[in-house]
Every structure is written in structure tokens, then in C-alpha cells.
Amino acid sequence: MPPLMPPLLEIRDLHLTMATRDGPAQVLTGVALRIARGEIWGLVGESGCGKTLTGLSVPRLVPCPPAHYPAGEVRLDGEDLMALSERRMRALRGRRIGMILQDPATSLNPTMRIGDQLADVALAAARHDPALLGPGPARTAARALAATMLDRVGIASARQRLSAWPHEFSGGMRQRVLIAMALIGAPDLLIADEPTSALDVPVQAQILALMQGMAADRGLGMILITHSMGVVARACSHVAVMYAGSIVETGPVVEVLDRPAHPYTRALMAAVPGRHTPRGTLRALPGTVPDLLAAPPGCRFAPRCPRATPACRAARPPLRPLGAGHAVACAHPDAPAHG
Amino acid sequence: MADPPLLELRGVSRLYRPRRSLLARGPEVVALDGVSLRIAQDESLGVVGESGAGKSTLTRIILRLERPDAGQILYRGADVARFGPGALRAFRARVQIVFQDPQAALNPRMTAEEIVTEPMLVHRDTVGLDRRGRRARVAELIETVGLRPDHLRRFPHELSGGQRQRIGIARALAAGPELLLLDEPTSALDVSAQAQVLNLLIDLQDRLGLGYLFISHDLAVVRYLCDRIALIRQGRLVEEGPAAQIFDAPRTACARRLIDAAPDLGAPLRSAGRTTGTD
Ligand SMILES: Nc1ncnc2c1ncn2[C@@H]1O[C@H](COP(=O)(O)OP(=O)(O)OP(=O)(O)O)[C@@H](O)[C@H]1O
Ligand SMILES: Nc1ncnc2c1ncn2[C@@H]1O[C@H](COP(=O)(O)OP(=O)(O)O)[C@@H](O)[C@H]1O
Ligand code: SF4
Ligand SMILES: [Mg+2]
Ligand SMILES: [Mg+2]
């Protein structure tokens, strides 16, 4: 048997506490994920469940304080990222770990032309990986790569658009520039926070296909944080459903979306309009995500769960395997029939 | 004779001439090219189209934040370009916009109460309420959008995304509008908040008879909410009609391409095209 290779990314029992005006909030409570090369993981859940903080924790972009990590590990190819010096971590960002932040409005420099911003990222990545730009003058090669990337994210007349300013682009075009920027350094792991929700459907499909291509051809591993179950169904190989700081259901997309076992996953899926949902009949989830300063003991979903029993409130259910890579953290899951 | 529609656009065009440098200007970008549209009271028009098609430009032109290079905008049959200051103020109270990103659209230093009150101050002569009347109206609005009175004391960052968007909608309702322009109002929201906001919009329309111009990239959402759909491509209106017709029997290749590309949860999952681990 070959020696066991560590996965591309492994997050183990990650806890994050956030100091707030009203005391410490337990924002992540034992997040666990294993992502292999070539896998695209959808990370879903209502807003405030900890998706962004999970994503930001990998390249260590959460400011500490106010954040504090009482427990947990984050490993990239087996290397403990939490133990790295800030200098080594900086070298990984943009090169081995690409990141698309959730708030695009603040991510582009309004006083710099699009092409210069992209070329700068390529040049920085090439300092660690000279093969990225090949021989010849680096600046010229970086601009050529910038044009190629703009073209691949579907910006028409990419070469001419290099000299455009951010304000001359529509919202969706700016978002695509950010995607190009995250991919231009040819990272091994891409963390993308809501990268396609501002994009029209064909462009969204094109970007997802680009990401899938990079996963299949180059073994890019990816965390795709999204609100869209459609995007998960279309683009992801795996999905992790997050609720109030931990992962409550996880597995291959075909398993989880076809046979959701957690009441929360089912409720999320029922809130999405389909092609034939009659007007006025959509079911929003009752209640809200709990206040993380005073989260209920036991299952954090219990106050909103139609199936909750005293057992649910007594102890927090751990993630239990259901077979076929599918796991659920629920005392009374829907038992999916695996055949 | 039938009443004129709430809003009518006739052959509206808009060009941008981006600067290449201090002196030189680049080639013209045609953001809107002869667009004609109508929205009746109590009607939702969904506007869909690729990124950069001109959808947001359309809202800026309707709000008169920018002037069209050609064409007319008629409000209840009257040409908006000829409005005097009084009529223009009334028009601005009657047509309100809700943006995509409630975080960016709300002033972070104002409480929800101040945010919802502001349009009543700006449009004081149209709204005509004194301080007491404004307070009562804010209380009513906050209930209308399904929030609690204690939410009024909060700042935007102390509200969830869905709650912030409700504040954005309450603000848009404050001056008593007849037409709401909704530019991707749910694309920054999670599916539960989206469902709440969509049901709220339906409820408001049923109660107040508002007209909606609803921009979204999510075709299932557009279909859920809208009576009619207008498809824009490179600034031009390429197809317009009842929602059911556009979705079930699109006439143009452009519409078909858009609908076929839509991720649809209603259809069974196909594993084709999905990557699996290579490790
Ligand atoms: N100030 C400006 N200067 C130059 N070009 C502009 C300006 N504003 C918009 N444009 C161009 O006008 C076109 C339409 O832009 P608009 O913002 O209306 O698109 P949109 O349909 O709302 O797209 P999205 O779905 O991406 O938001 C685009 O080609 C855009 O680049
Ligand atoms: N800088 C911060 N200070 C305090 N609390 C924060 C901060 N950032 C996020 N939080 C809280 O952490 C929780 C998870 O946030 P986040 O990861 O952004 O959720 P999601 O991306 O799933 O919407 C929320 O309760 C949020 O209010
Ligand atoms: S553990 Fe109990 S309360 Fe929690 S999701 Fe399962 S059934 Fe509901
Ligand atoms: Mg987030
Ligand atoms: Mg727009």
C-alpha cells in the first residue's frame, strides 16, 4: 500500500471565539473539513453561520484580536498553517492559496487600471514561481497573462480592457476581474466567498466551468461559499452545510442534495424557488440563527427544528457517518436509503 | 380611454464615452439602445440579461440620475424631461430604488429609524408629515416589512443581511412610492432571507398595488415574482412578454441560452459535468 498522503486541506476541530462588546461569542465550534486535490466543496448555510470566517481562517485573514482560536488545526498538504510565521504565510497567499473575498466593492483599487492590478498580482506570484510567466520581460508577460485571464472569465476585448478603470465596469464585470485576480497566480487551493452571485447565468456557468476545468486538469482544490443550491448542484463535487458555527451535514453533492438527512438542510432546500413554485408559496425558515453569545446547549438548531426532542437539547449531536461519504450531526436524521 | 401606464420608456438610449487618458476618449459604449418598456400599476416587470447589458443603467435613467441621449420617459403619461421642480420632486418621491447590497446602500452611522425617516424629510412637501406623523409612519413601516420596533434603534451592522434589506425596502416605501426599482435585491441574501424578502414584496404589491421593475440574475426568482419579463442584450430589448411564455416558449436564441444555462433545482441532479476527487 502506498503511504497515506495528507489531503490538500485539512481543517480539524476548529474553534474560533470572537471578543464582542457583550462578551465572547463562540463563532466556530469544531469545524472539520478534508479537501482533496480536484475537489470543489460547496459551503452553504444562512448568513451569520460562520462560512466566511471558516474561509478566512485558512489564509489567516481573521484579525486576532478580536478573534481567538482556542482549539483546532488547519493543514495545507500536511503543513500546519497556524504555526507558520507571518512572512511565510504571506508568501502562500495569492500563490498557493487564492482568495475571492465576499465584498467586491472594497477589493479593487479605484485609482489603478484593471490591467495593472492584475499584472501586479501575477508579478508577485512569479517571484515565488518563475515558471508562471516564462522567459522574457516580466512586465510584458504579466500583462499578457492578465489579458488571457480576463478573456477566460468572459470579458470581451480583454486586451483593450486592460487600460480600463474599475468604475467603467459593471458590477458583474468587476466581480470577474476579482476572480481573474484570484486565479492568475495558479493557486493550489481557491477559497471563493460568493463569487458568482452578482453574475448573469451564462457568465456564472462559464466561470464555474473554468473552475471545474482547473480542478480537473490541475488538481485545484476549492471551497465555494455560496447561497445558491443551484450552484452547488451544478458545480460542486461535495457540500458542507453549516449552521451556527459547525458543519451539520457533509458529503458528496449527489448524496446530500438528493437525500438530505438534516432538518436544516431540508429547510434550506425548501426555501429555494424552483421553476414552478406558485407565487406566494415559498417557505422561509422560521426564526433566526441563534445569538452566538447565548447559543442554546445541545443542538443549536433545536429552537427552529420541527423534530426537536429533549434528547436534542441535552447534548450536541456529533457528525455520524451514513455511508457513501455522507455524514450528519442530528439525533433524528432522515435515514437515507443507500443502495 | 385606458389610463396611461405607470411608467413608459420610449426608445431610450444612453452612450458612455470612457476616458482613455486626460485628453483622449475611448470608443463609445452603447449602454442602452432604443429601449421601449411599459410597467402598469400592480405589475412586476422582470428585467434580465447578461452582465453589462444595461440593466443598472436603465434604473439610473429612470431615476433621472442620468439623462438619456435619446428617447422619452413618461410617468403616468407625462414626459419626465419636462417636469418642473415641483413635479420632479413629486416624481422622485413616487419612484424609489432598492439596491443589491443592503450593507453598502445604508449609511453605517445612521440608526434604522433615521434611515427610514430620511426620505420623509427629503420629500417633506410631498409626504407632508410632522415629527409625530413621521414617527407613526416609521412604526407602521417597520411592521409592514416584518421587523420589530426595537430593530429601529440598531445600526446596519447590528442587523442580519435579510433584516438590512428589509430596512432598505422600508426606506424605499417611506415616501409613499408607486413604483419600486429593485436592482438585484436578493442576490446578496441567503436563501431563507431571500424567501422572506420575496414573500414581503408579493404581499406589499397585493396590499399597495405597487409597480415593480425587478432586476435579477436568478431566473427562478424572476419567474416566482414577475408577471412579465424583458430580456436586454447589449443595451437592446430582444424579447418581452408574459413570464410563462418567455420561460416555456422563448422566441429568441438569446432567451433560450439564458434559460438553458439556469441551474435548476427542480430538475433531478445529474452527475455529468461534476468533478470528483483525483486523489
Ligand atoms: N460611468 C461609466 N463609464 C463607462 N462605461 C460605463 C459606465 N457605467 C456603465 N458603463 C458601461 O455600460 C454598460 C452597462 O452597464 P450596467 O451597469 O448598466 O450593466 P448591468 O446590466 O447592470 O450589468 P451587471 O449585471 O453586471 O450589474 C457596461 O458595458 C458598462 O461597462
Ligand atoms: N469582526 C467580527 N467581530 C465580531 N463578530 C463577527 C465578526 N465577523 C463575523 N462575526 C460574527 O461571526 C458569525 C459568523 O460570521 P460569518 O463567518 O461572516 O458568517 P457567514 O459568512 O456564514 O455569513 C456571525 O455571528 C457574525 O456576526
Ligand atoms: S438534533 Fe434534534 S433538534 Fe437538532 S436538527 Fe436533529 S432533530 Fe432537530
Ligand atoms: Mg459571509
Ligand atoms: Mg448592474
Image: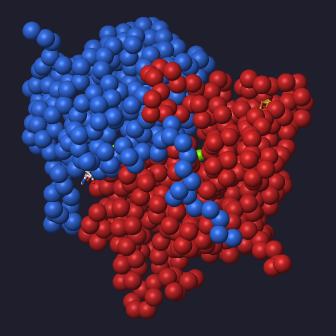
Chain colours: A red, B blue
Res B278 → quadrant? bottom right
* Nearer-the-camera pick, A260 or A89: A260
Residue A68, horizontal then vertical, whole percent: 77, 53
Report the side of B71 relative to B165 (left or right). Answer: left
Res B17 → quadrant? bottom left
Q: Quadrant of ligand 3?
A: top right
- Residue A290, above or below A63: above
Most extreme residue toward the front is: A339
Q: Residue at x 29, y 50 (%)?
A: B52
Residue A158, horizontal then vertical, whole percent: 30, 68
The quadrant of the image that shows the N terminus of chain B is: top left
- Residue B105, above or below B135: below
Report the side of A198 relative to B78 (left or right). Answer: right
Asked if residue B66 shows in the view, the reply is no
Residue A175, horizontal then vertical, whole percent: 42, 55
Q: Residue at x 33, y 62 (%)?
A: A155
- Residue B187, above or below A107: above
Most extreme residue toward the bottom is: A135
The quadrant of the image that shows the C terminus of chain B is: bottom right
| Number of numbered tags placed on the structure image | 0
Q: Residue at x 47, y 27 (%)?
A: A277
* Nearer-the-camera pick, B150 or A157: A157
Residue A328, horizontal then vertical, whole percent: 77, 43
Q: Residue at x 59, y 17 (%)?
A: B148
Report the side of A294 relative to B25 (left or right). Answer: right
